[in-house]
Image: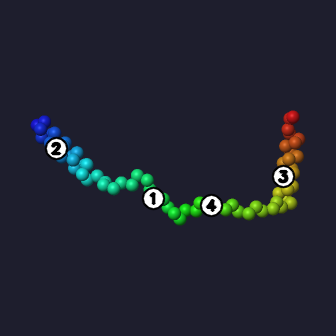
Amino acid sequence: MKKIFFAALVVIASAAIFTSCQETDEVPPVADNIASKYRTPDPEPLKQADRNLIKEQEREYSENAND
């Protein structure tokens, strides 16, 4: 019984070895069409409403700062 079990184990192991992938790619291929440089959008000038909001926040900060 042990010989049959051992023989079956050898057959299964050898089948697993011989049916495994022959040419495995461990590293994916490099894509050449990927952009390497990125362009940020042009800055927009501040509007008067934005400037007023910033001035209000600066005023509030200076009033609450405890130096």
Q: Quarter of the image holding residue 50?
A: bottom right
Q: Nearer the viewer, mark 3 or mark 1?
A: 1
Kind of residue indicated by mark 3 = Ile
Q: Secondary structure at mark 2?
A: helix
Q: What residue is shown with label 4? A: 37
Give the mark, 1 or 2, whose residue is nearer the N terminus. Answer: 2
Kind of residue indicated by mark 4 = Lys
Q: Quarter of the image holding residue 51?
A: bottom right
Q: Which mark is residue 29?
A: 1
Q: CA distance from mark 3 to mark 2?
A: 79 Å
Q: Are marks 4 and 1 in contact (CB under 8 Å)?
A: no
Q: Quadrant of the N terminus?
A: top left
Q: Nearer the viewer, mark 3 or mark 2?
A: 2
Q: From the viewer's perspective, is 36 left or right of 31?
A: right
Q: CA distance from mark 4 to mark 2?
A: 58 Å
Give the mark, 3 or 1, whose residue is nearer the N terminus. Answer: 1
Give the mark, 4 or 2, whose residue is nearer the N terminus. Answer: 2
Q: What residue is shown with label 3? A: 54
Q: CA distance from mark 1 to mark 2?
A: 39 Å
Kind of residue indicated by mark 1 = Pro
Q: What residue is shown with label 2? A: 8
Circle 1 crowding by C-alpha within 10 Å: few under 14, some 14–19, many from 20 = few
